[in-house]
């Protein structure tokens, strides 16, 4: 079987969609080496860092929002058809309205529908309407959690029978020991303190880092300067409505001196930054999956997360769950994990066990099973092109 994948996000590894395609395609290639794989990318130059055995097609076009829509709606499906692929897979929510070959779409989440403020402009609303319509016309939908599937059913009206859950996984680099020989160098690169609580890897409102800052204020009051709050990730322009001004909040809470802002973390260094943290806090109130929490668990770092459906699904008893938006209880959880070694060790043991339930090989095999199902159903239906209503 020949599968063509949309590679718009291949060169954007810091985005969630970029991480998905960069982990999924190598896992698919390893799991099914006899299949034919084509990665279709925008522009005129093919990337050189693709897995061996994967053909790359540069389909043209440019950058920017309009170029992205043109690539999704015209260039990608045309290139996939010309390549002779049996299946076209768009591994993010951005599929074409019409495709000459059967179409599989990964809808990682439906944030713009669940939280309309994320699609507040006219252009964003139009794009959301476009990709909603195109998803309804796909042969099959993949998503990354049962919680995300339920939201797709509710907000897109797609029946659950047309949706398959294929969980994400932590890369093998996220491990208590593998790669730990680099930790001292990573600590020096980011000027990490000996004891720190880690937050970050996303600053928009739903991530609720404001709650983590308010929670840390209780820790700072109790522990003084013995614990530092490390905030990782490239900071946004806080003037934008969906990004609360965390710098101003830190000043208001009088904790600025206890915070270290380390900026963007290289993907190669991320396991070390997570592994050396005393606690990783993930207070997000809406996620399709919540991969950073699983990555921290795989590193053997205790995790505190908001008690939302997807976190209950993914972490089970491998993390300390607190009510969403409750800074006082989150601060209490931070203090408990810093001060109670038996609690830390129990949580670490549970987390490591839970993390092993997720592998990219499992995800790849489940994804390929959907390709086979769609191909079989398409042959039975006479290979009609996919056209959304």
Image: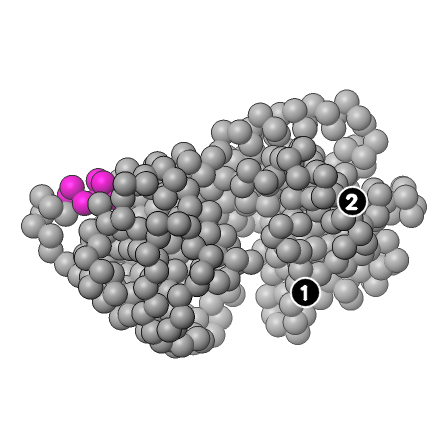
**Is residue 325 magenta-colored?**
no
SS under mark 1: loop
Q: Nearer the viewer, residue 119 or 141?
A: 141
Marks 1/2: CA–CA distance? 25 Å
Mark 1 neighbour density, 10 Å: few (under 14) some (14–19) many (20 or more): many
Q: Which residues are magenta?
A: 371-377
SS under mark 2: helix
Name the residue rendered at 71%, 66% in the picture: 245
Q: Which residue is mark 1?
A: 235
The circle drawn on residue 184 is 2
Q: Nearer the viewer, residue 106 or 224?
A: 106
Residue 354 at x, y = what percent? 55, 28
Residue 166 at x, y = what percent? 39, 40
Q: Nearer the viewer, residue 375 or 244?
A: 375
Dividing the image into 4 quarters, which one contains the C terminus?
Answer: bottom left
Residue 359 at x, y = what percent? 47, 35
The circle drawn on residue 315 is none
């Amino acid at each position: 079987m020949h599968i063509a994948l949309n590679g718009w996000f291949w060169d954007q590894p810091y985005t969630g969609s970029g991480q998905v395609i960069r982990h999924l395609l190598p896992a698919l290639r390893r799991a099914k080496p006899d299949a034919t794989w084509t990665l279709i990318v925008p522009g005129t130059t093919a990337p050189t860092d693709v897995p061996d055995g994967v053909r790359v097609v540069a389909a043209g076009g440019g950058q920017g929002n309009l170029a992205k829509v043109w690539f999704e709606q015209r260039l990608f499906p045309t290139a996939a058809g010309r390549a002779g692929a049996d299946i076209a897979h768009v591994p993010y929510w951005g599929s074409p309205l019409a495709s000459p070959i059967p179409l599989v779409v990964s809808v990682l989440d439906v944030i713009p529908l669940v939280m309309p403020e994320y699609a507040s402009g006219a252009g964003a609303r139009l794009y959301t309407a476009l990709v909603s319509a195109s998803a309804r016309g796909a042969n099959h939908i993949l998503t990354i959690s049962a919680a995300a599937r339920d939201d797709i059913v509710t907000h897109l009206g797609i029946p659950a029978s047309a949706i398959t859950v294929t969980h994400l996984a932590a890369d093998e680099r996220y491990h208590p020991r593998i790669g730990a020989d680099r930790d001292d160098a990573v600590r020096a690169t980011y000027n990490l303190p000996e004891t720190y609580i880690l937050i970050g890897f996303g600053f928009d409102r739903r991530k609720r880092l404001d709650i983590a800052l308010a929670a840390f204020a209780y820790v700072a009051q109790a522990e003084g300067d013995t614990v530092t709050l490390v905030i990782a990730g490239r900071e946004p322009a806080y003037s934008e409505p969906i990004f609360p001004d965390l710098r101003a909040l830190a000043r208001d809470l009088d904790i600025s001196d206890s915070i270290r802002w380390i900026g963007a973390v290289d993907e190669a260094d991320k396991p070390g930054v997570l592994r050396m943290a005393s606690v990783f806090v993930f207070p997000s109130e809406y996620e399709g999956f919540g991969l950073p929490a699983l990555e921290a668990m795989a590193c053997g770092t205790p995790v505190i997360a908001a008690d939302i459906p997807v976190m209950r699904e993914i972490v089970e008893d491998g993390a300390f769950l607190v009510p969403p938006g409750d800074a006082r209880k989150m601060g209490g959880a931070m203090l408990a994990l810093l001060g109670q070694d038996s609690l830390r060790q129990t949580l670490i043991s549970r987390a490591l066990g839970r993390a092993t339930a997720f592998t990219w090989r499992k995800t790849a095999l489940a994804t390929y099973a959907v390709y086979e199902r769609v191909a079989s159903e398409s042959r039975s239906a006479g290979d009609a092109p996919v056209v959304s209503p």
